[in-house]
Structure formats: structure tokens, C-alpha cells
Amino acid sequence: MNDLTHIGEDGAAHMVDVGGKAETHRVAIASGTITMSANALSAIRAGDAPKGDVLGTARIAGIMAAKRTGELIPLCHPLGLEAVNIDFTFGDDAVQATATASLTGKTGVEMEAMVAVSTALLTIYDMAKAIDKGMVIGAVRLIEKRGGKSGTWRAEG
């Protein structure tokens, strides 16, 4: 028997049937970073990057992307998200984005949180590339998920 939920007995990819699953409150938290030059970081922090409000635009882009995850990732269910929040913190040479997605439903929101973070970071790159084309996006990962049959999971480290 195949243990992969998105692969049928015939070996073909398919969307998982969640019809019989119970609705539970589900939350996922993901994060990632974009490392950059001191000039780019300073411009973003000061709000005077050439394209305007970098973090405000990145926040909106991440939220919009989370809502469209089912259109972007082939086997994801389209979900009626109840909340998506994106926060940014500054490091010595980077901006960290953290996204939290939640809903009450039959399937998790891990992909929505990860798509939100990835899109927010890509938007930061786009908005600040005139200052630093060598920015590096990395460490995009799930930090925590809650709800559903498997309960709570937290990343180690």
C-alpha cells in the first residue's frame, strides 16, 4: 500500500479527498529571510527605497498569495482563510518574514503560510533590487502547525 497521500493506487497524482475529515481550527506559522547589503537594509528600514513602502507592499503581496495558494500549488485545496498575518523583523544584514495563516476547516494551512512568506520575500527583492541585486532569499520553512488529526508540530531549532 502507498503511504503518500497525493499518489493513488495507480501511481497517479491526485487531490486528497478531505470530505470525510472533521473540521478543526488549524494554524500554520512559516518564516524565511532575505539577506542584503547594509544600504538596502537601511533604505527598507527608513522607508525610502526607490519603489516606496517595501514592507507594506510585501505584506499585502504575501496575504494575496496565501489566498491564491490553491491556484499556485497543483494539489492544494482552495481554502477560505480566516486570517493571514505577516510580520517582519530586522537582523544585522537581513529581514525575516513570518506568516501565520488560520482557518476552521478540513485541511491544513501550511502551504498557505509558506507561500505567503515566499511571496513577501520575493516582493522585498523586487522592491529593493535597484539597491542590491545580490539579495539572497533563504531558510523558508514551516515553524509550527496546529490542528487536524496529527495535532501540533513544531520545528526543532
Image (tube, rainbow, N blue to C red):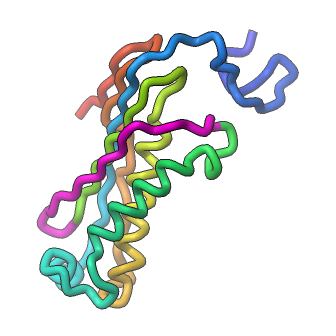
Residue in the picture at 42% in, 30% down: 103
Q: Image height check: is 155 above or below 1? A: below
Towards the viewer: 78 or 118 = 78
In percent of width and height, residue 116 lies at: 42, 52
| Quarter of image, res 18 | top right
Where, quadrant-wise, is the C terminus in this rendering? Answer: top left
Where, quadrant-wise, is the N terminus in this rendering? Answer: top right
In percent of width and height, residue 19 lies at: 66, 16
Residue in the picture at 51% in, 37% down: 80
Towards the viewer: 118 or 53 = 53
In-image side of 49 versus 38 (left or right): right
In-image side of 144 versus 46 (left or right): right
Q: Image height check: is 83 above or below 156? A: below
| Quarter of image, res 155 | top left
Residue in the picture at 29% in, 83% down: 52
In-image side of 10 versus 117 (left or right): right
| Residue 85 magenta | yes
Q: Image height check: is 21 above or below 95? A: above
Towards the viewer: 121 or 107 = 107
Towards the viewer: 131 or 106 = 106
User: How many marks on residues?
Assistant: 0
Residue at the right extreme, as displayed:
10
Which portion, as a residue range, is magenta? 76-94
In percent of width and height, residue 28 lies at: 37, 34
Residue in the picture at 22% in, 58% down: 88
In percent of width and height, residue 111 lies at: 49, 40
| Residue 8 magenta | no
